[in-house]
Amino acid sequence: MIRPLKYRRMRSIEETCSALMVLGPSARVLAGGTDLIVSLRGAEPKEDVILLDIGTIPGLGEIREEERALVIGSLASFAQIALSPLVRQLASPLAGAAARMGNPQVRNRATIGGNICNASPCADSVPALIALDARLHFVSTEGEHLLPVEETIDGPYSTTVPHDALLTDIVIPKLPAGALTSYVRLARRQAAAKARMAVAVVLVPDEKGNLVDVRIGCGSVTPRPHRMRKAEGRLLGSVPTDERLAASATDVAAEMIQETGIRWSTEYKEPAVKALTRRALREALGWD
């Protein structure tokens, strides 16, 4: 059961930011609602909850190409993103993540902005956005801010976003020519399952085959999502070999253990994340 809630439909970004500032923690932004409504079921908030529905604010659901970036509005649904020719062309790992998220009903409703701001460790979009070096455009009563995803999510279901800030756009720089990408996930079943682990990869080789840019983003691996820079450094500046890929995958597993410690699940997760990372790297290189 959900207790009675107050509801307001927002007409603009400015109105939403002002409402968030005035109402404080009692306000909840309603976009697709697939995470928010579930979290409110059976919950007993300390204060009355006021839903601020941003679903009809003009322009927040657009996907457009700019000179140097792909810009995705925070209200763009996962179905839109998965089917968008622009996303498939300019941000392939994100298109792959969107296509695997939930089921068709959820993908038609869930928004990328909600997926990011909910900050779930298993958020499908986040590893892809980290590997794509995405920036998040926030508007608040104090002005506008452009922040990397890594600086926005600081733990499970926790962000650094001010309470009066609204995510309006996701800005993804265009990849260099010849960039190789992949997104792989591990789940208990093929459909309507949360990602138990996910790995997104961007590799940029030069004309000799040396990797001049390596990006590895993981989900459900560490408490705070971030680039796996030691694992990336293992491959940077060299021609990839299967041995180097395996060593990079081992670095990802080692970083996971360093940040989370040894748990009952480590016996399973350590070989799993190694295998998933190696698979993602091989898939990006076209070896699988």
Image (tube, rainbow, N blue to C red):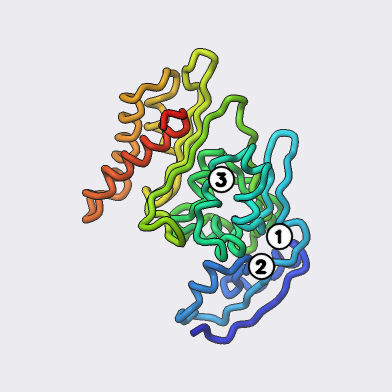
* Nearer to us: label 1 or label 3: 3
Q: From the viewer's perspective, is 234 left or right of 28?
A: left
* Near-viewer residue (175 or 258): 175
What element does badge 2 sit on?
helix
Which label is found at residue 21?
A: 2
Quarter of image, res 88: top right
State the residue at coordinates (64%, 63%): 164
State the residue at coordinates (40%, 27%): 233
How far from the left and from the top, in percent, is residue 232? 42, 30
Q: Give the answer, above or below, for where 196 lies relative to 69.
A: below
State the residue at coordinates (51%, 26%): 213
Q: Which mark sits nearer the N-terminus, 2 or 1?
A: 2
* Nearer to us: label 3 or label 2: 3
* Near-viewer residue (59 or 275): 275
How far from the left and from the top, in percent, is residue 44? 46, 82
Image marks 2 and 1: residues in contact by CB distance under 8 Å = yes
Q: Give the answer, above or below, for where 71 lies relative to 12.
A: above
Q: Quadrant of the C terminus?
A: top left
State the residue at coordinates (53%, 55%): 160
- Say if residue 218 shows up in the picture: no
What's the distance in space between the residues labelled 2 and 1, CA to CA?
8 Å
For label 2, count other residues whose C-alpha is less than 10 Å away and answer few (under 14), some (14-19) or many (20+): some
Q: Mark 1 — residue?
A: 141
User: Label 2 amino acid?
Assistant: Met
Q: Which mark sits nearer the N-terminus, 1 or 3?
A: 3
User: Label 1 amino acid?
Assistant: Thr
How far from the left and from the top, in percent, is residue 3? 53, 86
For label 3, count other residues whose C-alpha is less than 10 Å away and answer few (under 14), some (14-19) or many (20+): many
Which label is found at residue 11?
A: none
Q: Mark 3 — residue?
A: 94
Quarter of image, res 15: bottom right
Q: Which mark sits nearer the N-terminus, 3 or 2?
A: 2
